Amino acid sequence: MKNWNSVEEKWREQLQNKSDDIPEGLWSRIEERLDEKPARRFPIYWAAAAMLLIAIGISWNYNPAPEETTVVAKTEKSLAPVEMAVTEPSPLVLEVENSSLPTLKSSPEEVAMATSTTPEVTIIEQAPTEIVVASAPSIEKKSDAEEVIIVRLDIDPIEEVKPTFTQQKRRKSLFGKIVGEIRQALDGEPVNWQKLKEGNPALENNIHNVANTYIKTEENLKRTLQIQ
Amino acid sequence: MNKRLPSFSSETELINACRNNNRHAQHALFQQFAGKMLHVVKRYITNTSEAEDTLMEGFVKVFKKLEQYQGDGSFEGWIRRIMVNEALMSIRKNKDRFPVDIDVAFDVAHPDETLMQLGLQEIEDLIASLPKGYRTIFNLYAIEGYSHAEIALLLDISEGTSKSQLSRARAQLQNQLTALHR
């Protein structure tokens, strides 16, 4: 019993050398095409390719690099000579003291306490209606009152794996391949899309999107520049 | 061959002259292969006008890409592949879809003995009656001798799809022959 292969082989032999009549005028049409000057395609290709490269580059690389986050908090005490007018009853005035306050005007007891040499925090009782004016030479105040607390928070940055030079080169090489394949497809030659997708998982689902973007860009450029 | 190409002693000389843009040589090459290639194209594109346009595009490509022919394999085979590719491109441009992925293999019965007895015109009519998807794969595999792997690459389908479509094409050919002989 015959199998399909033998049938097809026989058919192939019969059909291989079959010839049709050549239509008239076809050669002159081909001649016209051969006489056409080559269109200015090269710059358009490269312009379209450059735009696509930029688009791909942006989409691949746009991942804002997390910077080292440092929070510096400063707390300072008031440094400058302060004239504080207490208008409301204030039972206590807390004052850092390491020097005498000669201008402190108050009751004799208070003056005595203020001029005491104990370099410690002194709690001064104060009459509600009294005006307390604290005034001291700025140099003295700066030397002891400045207190800066720096809080440094080092937050571990999200690890961004920046493409190495080799990876970038591979991407550019891949881009070149894609453009080459698209040009091949436009020229009517078979394109091995599957092979291009293999080993490039990023292209698995969007290879045709990339190709279509390229073609659309080229068409738009041609339309804009009115170039065939 | 030399009957048609009196001024070129060999195919190599003809090819070199074509590469140098010798219009006389290009015309001679066209005359030599156009009839056969039109027949090849028509097996894929049944519309005569479209087939002629495809043939023209194919020859323009042959002349422009002649530098790429390295002499491996027959020159006619090289031209034929360009024509087949051009025909497939033309089908794509017209937005005809190639078969979708259906990897179901069909059991095909052994072909009827009468298939071996068919004349040339009957074979052509039978193949032409196939739906475009089946016809394309049957032509590529059975007539042009492409492998399933090559067809899969050409049409961007899986090898399984190519195989199943071929099986369906064979089954349909068998059925049509049976119907004709009733």
Image: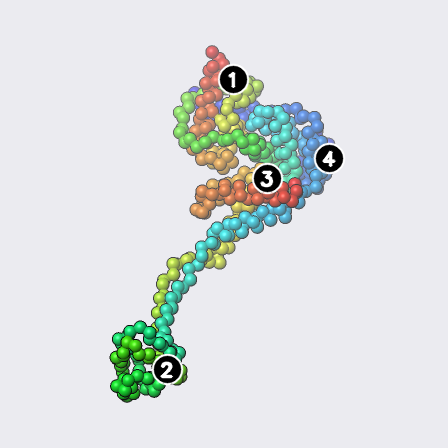
Task: State the separation of the CA atoms marked 2 and 4.
Answer: 111 Å
Q: Name the residue located 67 percent from the left edge and 25 percent from the top edge.
A: A23
Residue annotated with mark 2: A135
Residue B127 placement (x, y as % from top left): 52, 22
Query: Which element type, helix, strand or loop, lies under badge 3?
Result: loop
Is residue A92 rendered to the left or right of residue A11?
left
Report the amino acid beneath label 3: Asp
* Marks 4, 1 in one chain: yes
Q: Chain of mark 1?
A: B
Report the amino acid beneath label 4: His
Q: Chain of mark 3?
A: A
Residue annotated with mark 1: B117
Residue annotated with mark 3: A187
Task: State the separation of the CA atoms marked 4 and 1.
Answer: 43 Å
**Residue B164 vertical placement versus A127 (above, below):** above
Q: Name the residue located 45 percent from the left edge and 35 percent from the top edge.
A: B158
**Residue B130 vertical placement versus B159 (above, below):** above
Q: Earlier in the sequence, mark 4 or mark 1?
A: 4
Query: Which element type, helix, strand or loop, lies under badge 4?
Result: helix
Q: Quadrant of the N terminus of chain B?
A: top right
Report the amino acid beneath label 1: Gln
Residue A94 placement (x, y as % from top left): 29, 77
